[in-house]
Image (cartoon, rainbow, N blue to C red):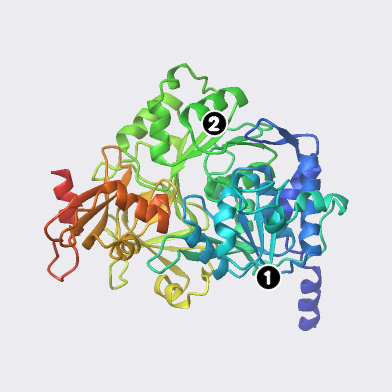
Amino acid sequence: MVANCKEEVAVNEPEFVSAPALILQSLAADPDRRAITTADGIELTAGDFAAATYRLAHELIARGVVRGDTVTLLTGNTAEALSGRYAAGLAGARVVNLYDGMSASTLAEIATSVDTAVLLVDAERYPVAAELLPLVDVPTVLTLGPGPAAIGPDVIGPDVIGPDAIAASAHRPAEPPAVRVGPDDDWGIRHTGGTTGIPKGIRSLHGAYRMVFDAPGRTGGDESGRTAGDAPRFLAATSLAHLAGLLSDLTLHHGGSVVLQRSFDPGDVLAAIERERITDLWVLPPLLYQLLDHPAIGRTDLSSLRRVSYGGCAASPTRVREALKVFGPVLVSGYGQSEAQNICMLAPHEHDRVGSGGQISVGRPIPGVEVVIRSADGTELPTGEQGEIHVRSATVMAGYWKRPDLTAEVLHDGWLHTGDIGYLDADGYLYLADRLKDKIIVVGGHVYPSEVEDLLLTHPAIAQCAVFGVRDAQEAEHVHVAVVAAPGQRPELDEVRAFVTTHKGRIYAPEALHLVDGIPLTSVGKPDKKRLREAVAG
């Protein structure tokens, strides 16, 4: 009798609906609403966008994409990028974004490492495709829209890049494909900096990603300052490959619209806020400061804003207080990691929470997330004591792609070792003190010093080097390098920057070069980067 009951429960268990499917259902249910405004001002209705995305999913399937394949996107901030991402998910493929700011050789290594079956290229990234395609062996390359007649003189033409997948999909059904996606299937792989030859790939599962949509509080929700029927209008002024993509997904699912910009320009952002009556904006702290310092800020109508989210790196308490005065009580701080998604949120009314060092709290753990502070030996520390932040939640990554060794270093019994140092106060608010991991957070991504150091040591003019991050008065980090020159050499900043940009990408290039007689060492023989930072400050 018990066995029969269990069987009945299993039969009646509701079918899992993935986040891409959920978003498309929301769009198709309200076909006449404006869903997307492109960077060129073209408006797309929810119905038209949903139909085009369904057709594209069928086209990918017709071209051989099956559940478990990898579809890699070489795309910018375009409607086609969003459509390609959702279509790949509907087809059961994992999605990988190739980030702007990385060199073609690094992108090629990423595309190869994730076993790319199909590469989708939009009009924003055709020049990069010209550099990338000779370096990879991808089975299928398709454009999202009309391909270029040629990229450069006889370099790459449309026959090499591949056909227009959107045009080819015109006769496909405008309905969901019959692909069963499960919660344990890969939704995507996000890449972050690493000490190996290529950035680490972070596996995200469909079930974990779907949870963000089931529990709006995990991203601060759409409850902050909203009233019933007040649909969000999100300005995607940073890369869709990063957090702006998630926020676009949530906006479209919650009945709102997304306004796209090709890149972040403070003047353009302020103009768009006023013109488009933007309600939601996401920025890294350095970009927030650019808005505050722009001459148009005082004459821009900001009254439509309901939520200005910031995070991703340390924020200056002074500048945050200034932003509260300028934008009003709409600032929401978030603390998270690619390995864990969102961890803590700080609402507008909580910005008076200041730690012992003067830093503003990053908030309290969001629903479903556990945070503990532990010492190096794993002992849980009491309130107020600093240690490594450990996180446990259903949205913690499944692991690093093809790197069980790295996965084992940071995941233990369901707990993620974040590598960040912090402490909790008596009310459960978290404060960040430092980073255990030696990484530099810059606009556009993470820079691991050892990765750049290994490259610089191949430069003929450099004998020794140490790469380190330096924060300015506004808490923004910058890449510095101390260099011991090879005999008879005197490396200059411009040539070092060009060398790093060519081999790794512009986000890795140092902003300052310091010629030294020797690299200072700690008592255990490691480069003493604290002394180097102090020397720069002095």
Front-most of residues 397 and 522: 522
> Which x, y percent locates residue 295?
41, 21
SS category of the residue bearing label 1: loop
Residue drawn 31% across and 37% down? 317
Instruction: Check disc 2 and give the amino acid type.
Output: Arg
Residue drawn 64% across and 47% down? 249
Instruction: Please name the residue that numbered disc 1 is placed on.
Output: 68
The reply to whether residue 339 is visible in this rendering is no
Instruction: Check disc 1 and give the amino acid type.
Output: Gly
Q: Label 2: few (<14), some or many (≥20) within 10 Å? A: many
Q: Label 1: few (<14), some or many (≥20) within 10 Å? A: some
Q: Along the polypeptide, which appears first: circle 1 or circle 2?
A: 1
Instruction: Please name the residue that numbered disc 2 is placed on.
Output: 306
Quarter of the picture containing the C terminus is top left
Q: Quadrant of residue 306?
A: top right
Mark 1 or 2, closer to the camera: 1
SS category of the residue bearing label 2: loop
Front-most of residues 334 and 129: 129
* Side of 315 where 161 appears, left or right: right
